[in-house]
Image: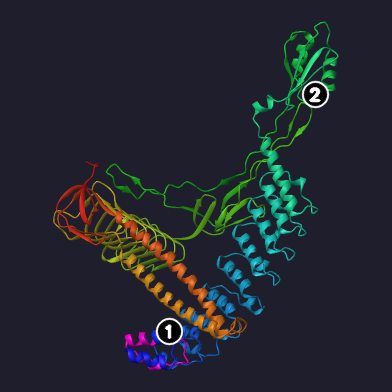
Amino acid sequence: MTEDARLNYIHEGFTPDQISEIEEGMKAGIDVSVYARKDFLAMQMRQIRKGLTDNLPMAVYAKPEYDWFQLEEIREGLSSYIDVKKYDSPEIPYDKMRQLRKGLEKEIDLTSYLSLEAGIIRQIRKALISDVDIQLYVEDGYDEEQLEEIRIALQEGLDIHQYVKKEFRGISLHEIVEGLRKNVDVSVYAKEEYSWRQMREIRLGQMHQIDVSFYTDPWYDYRQMKELRLGLEAGLDINNYVSLMYTAKEMGKRRLELMDMGSDSATSDKEIKSGASETVESRDGLLITISADEMEACVRVVDPSVQLTRKDVLRDLKNEGIVYGIDQREVDNLISGRTIQDTIVIARGKPAVQGENGYYEFFFRTNVDHSPKVQADGSVDYRNVDWFEQVKRQQKIAYYHAAGAGEVGYTVTGRRIAAKRGREQSRLRGKGFLVLPDQKTYVSIMDGRIELTDNNIEISKMVEFQEVSLATGNIRFDGNVYVKGNVGDGTTIAASGDVVVDGFVEAATIVAGGNVILRKGMNASGSGSITAGGNIEGKFFEAVVLKAGNDIHANYCMNCEAHADGEMVIFGRNGSVVGGAVYVVKQLSAQNIGNRAGILTRINVGVSEKMRREQREVEDKLRDNKMELMILQNAQADFQAKYPAEIRNTMEMYLKIDNAIFTKNKIIDDLMIRKEAIEKNIANTMTSCIVCSGDLFEGVLIDINGRKLKSNYAKNVTIRVSEGKIVLFANLFNK
């Protein structure tokens, strides 16, 4: 834009932001006359400009009656090649437009729901995408928050229907959903008389396996419930404060006092025995001593001339309060005169015995070793690895043995010492199972793969096939796929979880959200591929395209195109990477790289193109959002300069701008976090390297973070970048 043109726009009353948008349009070579009008806000201009730049028919919608939020939704819809005529009316608010657009992008027409609030339409859209039915609740007038919790529960396969009530707010339904998710008995608290905070305290108590009946009275407020719960979890005798007469603050004070008393009682035996004891002389010449903790009573005869009888001794002991644990043999020794002038222990108390802690008994192998065994030649045996543990539907998978009550103790004076109950274990978390009404027995609700991690059990769906061929057809499954035999040419396996194949794989396509594990290997003849969100593991890979979100492990790799966002490890004394191209972010480890014949082998280590692409995308989004934020802030400042707060705060456009600024700041914050994570990952690649413990053959093309080298023959080396160039270092191992 020439200076004269700029001055002309200024003279006509265009703002700097409007002029900036016109200038950007000129740079892009578009017809700026479509939007170079003073009655367009700069943000409206921006949406029209971006659409015209992308060759979208935005001129049709270049009308001031569309606010910039609506123009953005129309532009996004045109970019996605959907029928925007279903929502392009200026009368439809932008938030409803957004839901209709997102629905149409998934081939879902939501125009019949336009009379509903945008938030309700949003929940309908998400439910339809997830193939769950919330229509009944929509018709009954449930609000957005309620519908969201119902939808989430149904998506996770939780039986929420019996607990849904109009009287429950969304946050109350959330507590019910959390309870169902954690397999607690939600019927205890899914009641109208409880607030969501009271529900939470009861739910947490059930998860920690305490007796919540102590505080399920709805007259307790949630703070009182919390104090009672914390006391029970600490193993305290809450009878001291379990009463509605105490406020939550008073309960808290009593709970802390009880905890302090408990810590005081933890004094060592040595300290107790060194404390004060009570010594008295009976009328029969017996010196009777009771220890400070009343757990032991001793006697000594101080007047041998007195002829003692059993009755005398027992009477003297009783007179001093000694009624428990009397040793009758020592009484006999006293009256026989065998222990004159000797101090003897005449009675012993019984210490309280703490109950055994609760524990789980599992009915499946919890310690399956997923690690392949390294053989004598350094290669890895994939054939004999237990990759998973399977369970059947309705199979009992665990049983909880409750903590023992312990045994009551008594002092020699007969004082009762309360037993401390063993510590209960928290409930098992996870999915794919239910807890029977006894609240102890855990049962699988599906056939599938089971894993135990810490206190979490996860059962995921698994389907088995004897083989996969053109005769059986392609496999697409939301879960894990296990093939006992071979996978033939031209077939496809797509799974959201892991794929495990016992046999050989030919020129097939395997896509997994988790790991891909081949007990044997794969020869794709240049027309097969494996894509995994996790690891790819197999005995060998020949002429395969491999893409792993984590690592690639094999015994050899020949003529493959291999991509690993983690590392690639080729095991064994003959473990080789020969031919093809390898792209590894962290490290390549192999015995041999290349071969004597000089077959073209490319090794690329360090920053991946995927990482660079993500970095560019984030930076582009940051730049665009910062620019949009600046325009919004300038528009906000214009409103603030023109109108007092009491007027502008009632203006729809000003409120939209204010909300958009808040949203933009959040988007920018999230993008900055993502940008920092990507930059950290890129920085970590500065130590990426290649470890060749055998032969590095001549002619291997090496690229480490953009530094290139064509190898000469070398043996037992590590290759990395040092001082800006690729350097080979002799390994001190495997010589």
Question: Where's residue 730, x and y in %?
Answer: 21, 45
In the rendered structure, which disc, 2 or 1, sits on the residue that comes first in sequence? 1
Give the labeled residue for mark 2.
322
Q: Is residue 495 visible?
A: no
- Whether residue 367 is in magenta: the answer is no
Amino acid found under the numbered disc labelled 2: Ile
Amino acid found under the numbered disc labelled 1: Asp
Location of residue 595 (image quadrant)? bottom left
Q: Identify the image quadrant of the N terminus.
A: bottom left
Left-right relation of 493 to 719 = right
Q: Secondary structure at mark 2?
A: loop
Question: Where's residue 697, x and y in %?
Answer: 16, 53
Is 30 or 480 nearer to us in this picture?
30
Q: Is residue 518 visible?
A: yes
Residue at the far top in the pictured view = 305
Residue drawn where x is 85% and y is 22% of the image: 319
Mark number for residue 17? Answer: 1
Give the magenta range. 21-42
Left-right relation of 574 to 262 = left
In the image, is residue 422 above or below residue 479?
above
Question: Where's residue 409, x and y in %?
Answer: 73, 32
Callout count:
2
Question: Where's residue 662, x and y in %?
Answer: 52, 74
- Whether residue 30 is in magenta: the answer is yes
